[in-house]
Amino acid sequence: MTSALDVKGDAQSLLERMRSAVEGALEGKPDAVELGLVCLLAGGHLLIEDVPGVGKTTLARAMARASGGELRRIQFTSDLLPSDVLGVSVYDQRRNHFEFKHGPIFTNMLVADEINRASPRTQSALLEAMNEGQVSIDGHTTPLPDPFFVVATQNPEDFAGTYPLPESQLDRFMMRIHIGYPPSHVEQRLVLSPNLDRVGSVAQVLDPQELVRLRREVDRVKFDTSLARYLHAVVTATRTSPAIAIGASPRASMNLSLAARARARLRGRDYCIADDIHDLAVTVLAHRVRLAAQADGYVPNYDEAEATIRDLVARVPVPL
C-alpha cells in the first residue's frame, strides 16, 4: 500500500480529513474531538470522565476507524483479573511447554470502559503497557503494537461501585477530558434517527504506519526556549501552591510539551505558541495533582483541581 503521506505530501490535509471524519460521528463536540486527536497524535493516553451515554466510546471508536487501527474494548468490572487484560500462559501438552495467549491489550487502540469499576490489582495491569508499550508475564517481555493508544472511560467518583484511580495510574494518562451533553439541535437529530450507526460511516483516513509518521512530525514542531520556561513555571506553580499537596510530575511537563506540539500540528503550524500551553494546561495537569484538602482522606475531586489549576495558570506571566 502506498502511503497517503508520500502521495499527497500534505499531512495537514490528512489531519483535517481525520478531524472531519471523527466530528461526523460525535456531532456538536468539536473541542472534545480536537483534544482526543491531540492526545492520539502526541502518543499519549486519554481518560474521559462523564456520565454514561454521552459518546465516550463513540469518540474512541471513531478515532480508531479513522486511523485504521485495530480496536478492542474491555468492560472493566470488579471481578476482572489482570490476565483478562494482559493474557495468560497456557500449557500445551503436545509440545510440552507453556504458550502465551495474548490478551485484548495487544491492539492499536484499547477502550478500557469504566476503568474505575475494576479493582486496583487489575488497574495496575495497565501501568507497564501505558508507560513502556510492553507487557511482562512469567519472565517474558512482549512489545505491544505500534501505535498503542488507551482510551479509558470512568464514571464520576460518587457513582456506586467505583475505585479511585491511584496517582501512578492517573499520571500515565496524558489528558483527562469531559464530553458533556450534546447541543439541543444535535440531540433532536439523534432522536429522529436513533438506530443510525454514525461510527460505521466514518471513513478510514490513515493507516497505523501513517499515524506513526505523523507522530514523528509532531516531535519536529518547534518549541522555543521561552515557551519551555513558561511551561516549567506553570508546572512549578503546582508544586509550590499551598492549595496543592502533590504537584505535577516531570512526566506531566513532558506530556504538556508533547500535547502543545500536537495541537500546533493539528492546527497547521510547525511551531508552538504560548496559547498551546495555556489552553491545554488544565486538561493535562488537573487530574495529576492532589489538593491539600484531600491529603488526609484521598477522594479525587477533579472539578476543584481544575479550578485550582486554572487559577494558577492565570497567575503565570505569558511570554510575549
Image (cartoon, grey):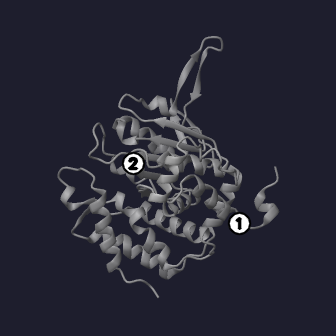
Q: In this view of the protein, which residue sits in the foreground, 54 or 222?
A: 54
Task: Locate residue 185, reporting x and y percent.
Answer: 48, 59
Name the residue that disc number 1 marks. 13
Task: Locate residue 286, reporting x and y percent.
Answer: 35, 62
Badge 1, how many Cα within 10 Å: few under 14, some, many 20+?
some
Above or below, 164 relative to 7: above
Choose mark 2 or mark 1, whichever is in front.
Answer: 1
Q: Could you tell me which secondary element the residue under label 1 belongs to? A: helix
- Residue type at mark 1 is Ser
Name the residue that disc number 2 marks. 169
Mark 2 touches mark 1? (CB < 8 Å): no
Left or right side of 244 for 4: right
Q: Could you tell me which secondary element the residue under label 2 belongs to? A: helix
Above or below, 201 relative to 182: above
The residue lying at 56 percent from left, 59 percent from top is: 37
Badge 2, how many Cα within 10 Å: few under 14, some, many 20+?
some
